[in-house]
Every structure is written in C-alpha cells, then in structure tokens.
Image (spheres, rainbow, N blue to C red):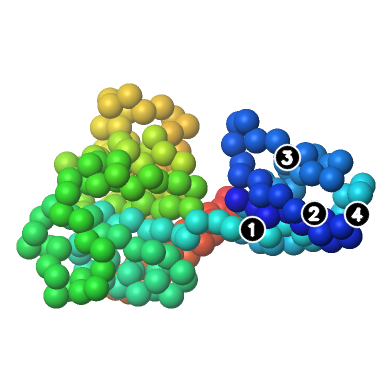
Amino acid sequence: MVLATALDSGDARLVEPGPDEDYEFCGADLEEEILKALSENRSSVIAAPGGEIFLNVFNPALRLVIVGAVHIAQALIPMATALGYDVTVIDPRGAFADGQRFAGLDVSLDWPDEALLGMALDARTAVVTLTHDPKLDDAALAVALKSDVFFIGCLGSRKTHDARLQRLRQAGFGKDSLARIHGPVGLDIGARSAAEIALSVLAQMTQVLNGRAP
C-alpha cells in the first residue's frame, strides 16, 4: 500500500491498490503515480493541483521460493538474502533437504504445488526451479503460472526447456503464460560453477524486477 500525505495540509490516507480502490486524494487522481511508485518500490514527492504529495511506499518483502534443495540453491540463498529476499526452499526429497545443509532456513518437505498454494504468491515473489525433475518442477510451475509472481525461472538446457514447454502446453497453458518462464534461467555470463549460476539467476531476477528485461 501507499501512504499519501499532502505536504501543505498534512492530510493523509492509505491507498491499497485493487479493482475497487478510489485513488482520489486532495482533488487529484493518483492511480498512475501510485501504481508506478509501487512497481518501482520507490517513495517520492509528486506535484498535484492542490500542492505536493508525498507517496510513501509500503511493499511486502521480496520473496524467493526455490524448488530443489541442490548445491546451486546453497549458493543462491546467501546471495538472495543479501539482496533482501526472504528465502524458502521446497523439496519433498528428504535426503536433499537435509537440515545441516540448510540450517536456519525455511525448508518445506511438501510437494511443490501444495507448498506454493499455501504461500499467497504475489508480485513481490520469484519462483526458481532447480530439480531437473519434471514431477517436481512442473508441479511448481502449474501454480506459479497462475499467480502474480514477478519472476519464474527454470534450470536446464534448451532441450530440457523445450520439452518442459511442450508438457505445459499439453496441460493447457497458452503462449502468453509460457512466455513468462525464463529458461534456461539466468543471464548468459558463461556461468559454470554453482556460485556463478546463482549469480546469473539473481542478475536476471534483478533485471526483471527493475523493469530492464528485454
């Protein structure tokens, strides 16, 4: 939501975007400015007919949901945390989701679709699948594609990704939905090690979050 405050009078109101929200404040329609501020996650002062208005942005925390408790996840987690993400790892394979490898982290042993359905996915959430197992990755994608998450990424070769898209088409997902998936995930920086792959993934997530993706 956004707290709009008229700097001259001190009048203020909270605006929570939605189909029924009234964006009128101090004689001005602030819908465009408020949605832009939320999208950019940036508080600012704007000019309005009645005087300057301060838009103070209160966005939910950034979240990263990683499907697959693999070695790349171990490299990705601290980098994402440093960038302000709350990280959750999902992997029903107990041998992978070992507490010692992911100590202090929120790890779900539920099946990916069940876990994601309980998370209230929103436009401040990214979902990245790393398992290479269609049973797990596709289950997560089936939920993520129906949500407002800002980023969906899948590890794997181009051949693997083409097969993934074919399965999702057969499951009923259309061209526009499938275009949301970044696969193979990560910017092309020649990444080879787990840390380099994690870096490329976070770079692409940041690019999309900041509206710089081509």
Query: Circle 1: is it few (<14), some (14-19), or many (20+) Cα within 10 Å?
Result: many
Which label lies toward us, 2 or 1?
2
Q: Which residue is mark 4?
A: 51
Q: Which residue is mark 3?
A: 23
| Residue at position x 60%, y 50% in the image | 1
Q: Quadrant of residue 8?
A: bottom right
At mark 1, the secondary structure is strand
First in sequence: mark 1 vs mark 3:
3
| Residue at position x 92%, y 47% in the image | 49
Q: Amino acid at mark 2?
A: Asp
At mark 2, the secondary structure is loop
Q: Is residue 124 left or right of residue 185?
A: right
First in sequence: mark 2 vs mark 4:
2
Q: CA distance from mark 1 to mark 3?
A: 14 Å
Q: Is residue 62 left or right of residue 164?
A: right
* Residue 110 place in picture, x, y as percent: 17, 49
At mark 4, the secondary structure is strand
Residue 176 is at least partly visible in this image: yes
Query: Circle 2: is it few (<14), some (14-19), or many (20+) Cα within 10 Å?
Result: few
Q: Which residue is mark 2?
A: 11
Q: Amino acid at mark 1?
A: Val
| Residue at position x 21%, y 51% in the image | 132
